Image (cartoon, helix red, strand yellow):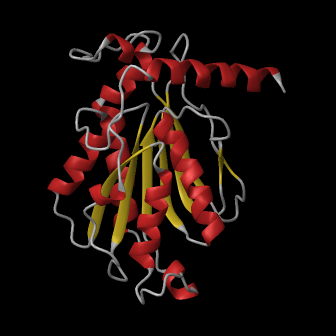
């Protein structure tokens, strides 16, 4: 294993230990509100939360953005949040959303009709890429993936079923830093919108109310989750993808 890979692995292990301070209650499929199947031209947006954050936590960036998008009352747009360890129920939701003839299988037309946008933060950013790979195995396309300070192994390579991908990260953290550069497995099929770095060396971001386990060893990581500029960028990327033909 290369030195850089070992360094990355150390980040992931440490991040996982620190994430243990907030226990998820355990999301189930029944927590989704999207009626299935969805209409042919409907869009499904999935946000994957970081660490052990609960699926309905609106204090973290993924939950805040989901709540804001729901507040826009976008016609034909369904928004769900998913705990990063619950990718299986998210796959089930996608299958049920596209299975319009309810035969338990996805035919070519059903798969091609998918209008999926996926974003996530921290371990949720890594879950975005893993989830996209699961959909690739099913032949389901993804319009856009967005990773925010993604923490994981193998989260730098975007699978070919993704049309466009963006990566937002910080490199100020002493112990935990996000994936610095994503790349397309097939550049002819996936456009990398950008690898956008945010600098927190001299930026004051309000972290009041966060428990010690959210800040110890990862202040810059926590600042990125609270940074309104980060989530304004993610929101713009998501809305552009919603409106795209």
Q: Quadrant of the C terminus?
A: bottom left
Q: Is residue 199 visible?
A: no
Q: Quadrant of the N terminus?
A: top right
The picture quadrant where one finds residue 4 is top right
Report the side of 5 relative to 151 (left or right).
Answer: right
| Residue for point 30% across, 27% down | 226
In the rendered view, would you say 159 is above or below 36?
A: above
The picture quadrant where one finds residue 213 is top left
In the rendered view, would you say 113 is above or below 203?
A: below
Q: Position of residue 85 (x, y in %)?
A: 48, 43
| Residue for point 55% across, 31% down | 151
Q: Position of residue 238 (x, y in %)?
A: 37, 55
Report the side of 28 relative to 169 (left or right).
Answer: left
Give whichever of 72, 46 is nearer the camera.
Answer: 46
Q: Is residue 224 visible?
A: yes
Report the side of 92 relative to 133 (left or right).
Answer: left
Give whichever of 156, 151 is nearer the camera.
Answer: 151
| Residue for point 60% across, 25% down | 12
Q: Position of residue 129 (x, y in %)?
A: 57, 49
Q: Of all residues shown, which one is farthest toward the bottom?
A: 101
In the rendered view, would you say 74 is above or below 213?
A: below
The picture quadrant where one finds residue 98 is bottom left
């Amino acid at each position: 294993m290369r030195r850089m890979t070992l360094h990355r692995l150390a980040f992931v292990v440490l991040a996982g230990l620190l994430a243990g301070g907030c226990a998820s209650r355990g999301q189930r499929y029944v927590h989704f509100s999207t009626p299935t199947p969805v209409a042919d031209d409907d869009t499904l947006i999935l946000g994957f939360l970081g660490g052990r954050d609960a699926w309905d936590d609106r204090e973290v960036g993924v939950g805040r953005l989901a709540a804001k998008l729901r507040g826009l009352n976008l016609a034909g747009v369904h928004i769900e949040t998913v705990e990063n360890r619950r990718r299986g129920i998210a796959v089930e939701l996608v299958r049920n959303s596209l299975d319009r003839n309810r035969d338990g299988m996805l035919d070519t037309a059903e798969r091609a009709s998918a209008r999926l946008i996926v974003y996530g933060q921290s371990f949720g950013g890594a879950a975005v890429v893993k989830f996209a790979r699961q959909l690739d195995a099913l032949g389901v396309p993804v319009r856009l993936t967005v990773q925010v300070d993604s923490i994981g192994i193998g989260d730098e390579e975007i699978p070919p079923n993704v049309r466009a991908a963006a990566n937002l990260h910080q490199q100020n953290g002493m112990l935990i830093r996000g994936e610095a550069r994503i790349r397309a497995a097939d550049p002819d099929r996936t456009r990398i919108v950008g690898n956008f770095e945010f600098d927190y060396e001299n930026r004051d971001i309000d972290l009041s109310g966060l428990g010690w386990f959210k800040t110890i060893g990862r202040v810059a990581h926590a600042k990125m989750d609270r940074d309104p500029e980060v989530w304004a960028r993610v929101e713009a990327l998501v809305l552009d993808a919603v409106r795209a033909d």
